[in-house]
Image (cartoon, rainbow, N blue to C red):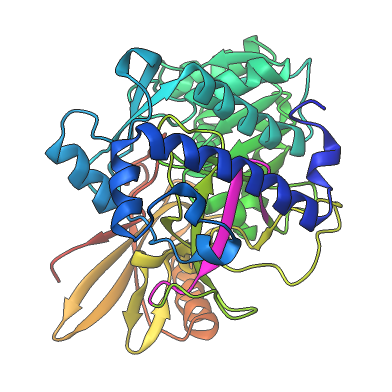
Amino acid sequence: MTFFDRERETTPPERLRAWQWERLAGGLAEIWATNPFWRARLAAAGLRDPRDVASWDDFARLPRLEKPELGADQAAHPPFGTNLTYPLERYVRAFQTSGTTGPPIRWLETEESWAWWARCWVYVFRAAGLGPGDRLFFPFSFGLFIGFWAGLEGARMLGGMALPGGGQDSPTRVHWIRELGVTALICTPSYGLHLAEVALAQGIDPARLGVHTTIHAGEPGAGIPAVRERLETLWGARAYDHAGMTEVGAYGFACAVQSGLHVNEVEFIAEVLDPETGRPAAPGEPGELTLTNLGRWGAPVLRYRTGDRVRLAAGPCPCGRTFTSLEGGILGRVDDMLVVRGVNVFPSALEGIVRRFEAVDEFQIEVYRRGELDEVRLLLEIDERRWAPDAIAGTCGTIVETVRRNIGIRVEVAPVPSKSLPRYEMKARRMVRREA
């Protein structure tokens, strides 16, 4: 059976669980023997032997791992920390986290774990309908952030043509999409919108460039219906969501149904837990996604708190996959939640409203204090050359009313000049805190 065999994706849950346990047990034995970080951590949890984890109930009692713990380990043992199962000579690649949620953390890969990354990406590509013959373009600066590095390798393993777009500005990337006959675009959703905007400014209709599929990661955008619809309209393509983390791997992908994300349970164990108690979230209630990877034993994570807010889907996906489904994909970050006059508000909910309006090219959420309360201001980038003053005023007013009606809060809205807000090819910083 090859790693991308459809049979594995549709296997009964009990068989999938048995497969996970077999890999988990083997990995626990390996890291107990030679990984200083995990040996100390498991011993501190009262384990005397990896065989003490003899059931899923035992596994659920293991402490959850948090990102600051990894950072503290690397600070105490620079430059790579102690989460290393093998001698340094066995590691062949070095990366680091993006730094958007704290100081960057370095991560090392072996030949085996790098191949594992590529396999995980093949699941993403195949679920989006890609295969041999496709030309996959990655408009990404290939630095230390792992980003789409592994996707590039996954494209090769898929049998497609991998086209790196590093070292290029956006107009040049549009040129190469056309010249090279690109059929699939892989980037963040905000950069996908920006690249389409650049093409239009050059008099090029992105929907006529031949791209039939776009895949987006790094932000919740492609999982938000309004954002996905906008991407699909601009590019004339199907847009698919994907989720991954440097610390964990490429774990989630959207299928043709596009109702959320599947977790690749061949390679990951997924739990949706109450972030405060650590107990499973109640059915239908959102919780924090907690992940264990099963193919990266050179630097593994067990029960890692991703910080992503998700909700388990109520029933099986019509696509036939038996993998866990996350309804609506990544709903937001647990630590991004705002409380505005007693109402819980996530940036992704605001984006889902703003992106419905054609006049808004880009936006940013400003949070500021008025007295003892958080208030929200939406900066809306609207091109005054394309939209009349009354149209701009109407758009702003409708957004204010839609937020009030759908979310239950009052926001300020301020139009800003075209091209005045930052664009990111990596993770967009949608929310900033300002002085009033």
Q: Is residue 260 left or right of residue 346?
A: right
Residue 241 point in image, percent of width and height: 62, 46
Residue 194, above or below 290: above
Is residue 337 visible in the rendered image? The answer is yes
- Identify the residue at image location x=48%, y=56%: 52
Please give the range of residues in magenta: 261-276
Q: How many marks?
A: 0
**Above or below: residue 46 compared with residue 51:** below
Q: Residue at x 43, y 29 (%)?
A: 298
Queried whether the magenta region covers residue 265, the answer comes back as yes
Q: Is residue 343 above or below residue 156?
A: below
Dividing the image into 4 quarters, which one contains the C terminus? bottom left
Q: Position of residue 185 (x, y in %)?
A: 62, 29
Tell me what residue is drawn at x 58 percent, y 78 percent.
285
Look at the image and tell me in which quarter the N terminus lies. top right
Between 407 and 147, the residue placed more toward the observer is: 147
Task: Please report the residue visible at 47 percent of the width from the left and 43 percent of the height from the top.
Answer: 218
Q: Position of residue 22 (x, y in %)?
A: 65, 43
Q: Magenta segment: does it hold 4?
A: no
Q: Quadrant of residue 246?
A: top left
Q: Is residue 397 left or right of residue 7?
A: left
- Residue most toward the bottom? 342
Q: Is residue 253 visible?
A: no
